[in-house]
Image: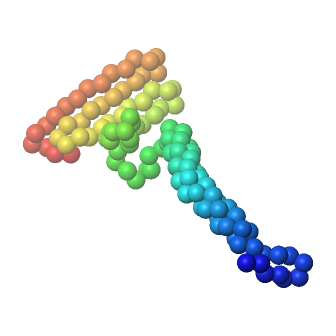
Amino acid sequence: MNFTLGSHAMTKRGSVRNDVMKLKARKRLMIGAPALVAAAGFATAAYAQAQGQDQRTPKGWSYEIKDGKRVPKGDRVTNADGSWREEVRQGNCVTIKERSASGEYKETRQCNPGNPG
């Protein structure tokens, strides 16, 4: 079965070759597209993980995330000499962390069952 269009002859053999090429292209897309999506996902996850180490907890939150766990955020007051005092409230308990200018660290915890917060 030969058709003539101008100087080009179109045969049945030519259309079979075209079908085979389409199948190969489709097969490559079926394999390549998921691989591309997976690579993009891994790259995004790696970027997010690298950026997550530098991020700070927003100011309005009462906790921060350390090692994937929620940790109550304390009220810290820092003095000009480098010393600081931080109070962390958890339920009925208050933990006070203090560090002097000379580097001495002290942590005390007091719980009052009758006085929540």
Q: Which of 22 and 115 is in front in this view?
A: 22
Q: Residue at x 14, y 43 (%)?
A: 115
Q: Is residue 48 visible?
A: no
In this view, which residue lies farthest toward the right?
Answer: 7
Q: In this view, does 101 lie above or below 90?
A: above
In the depicted structure, whether residue 89 falls above or below residue 79: below
Coloring scheme used: rainbow
Residue 96 visible here: yes
Q: Is residue 35 left or right of residue 94?
A: right
Q: Image quadrant for the N terminus? A: bottom right
Image point (27%, 32%), residue name:
95
* Residue at (19% x, 31% y) in the render: 110
Q: Residue at x 65, y 62 (%)?
A: 20
x, y percent for residue 86: 36, 34
Q: How many marks?
A: 0
Tell me which corner region of the image, top left, top right, bottom left or bottom right, holds residue 87. Answer: top left
Answer with the quarter of the image where residue 94 lies: top left
* Image position, residue 5 (x, y; %): 84, 82
Camera-nearest residue between 105 and 35:
35
Quadrant of the image containing the C terminus: top left
Q: Where residue 26 sits: x, y (%)?
A: 60, 61
Q: In this view, does 10 lie to the left or right of 53?
A: right
User: Residue 84 location in percent, x, y?
Assistant: 42, 30
Name the side, left or right, on which 76 lies relative to 80.
left
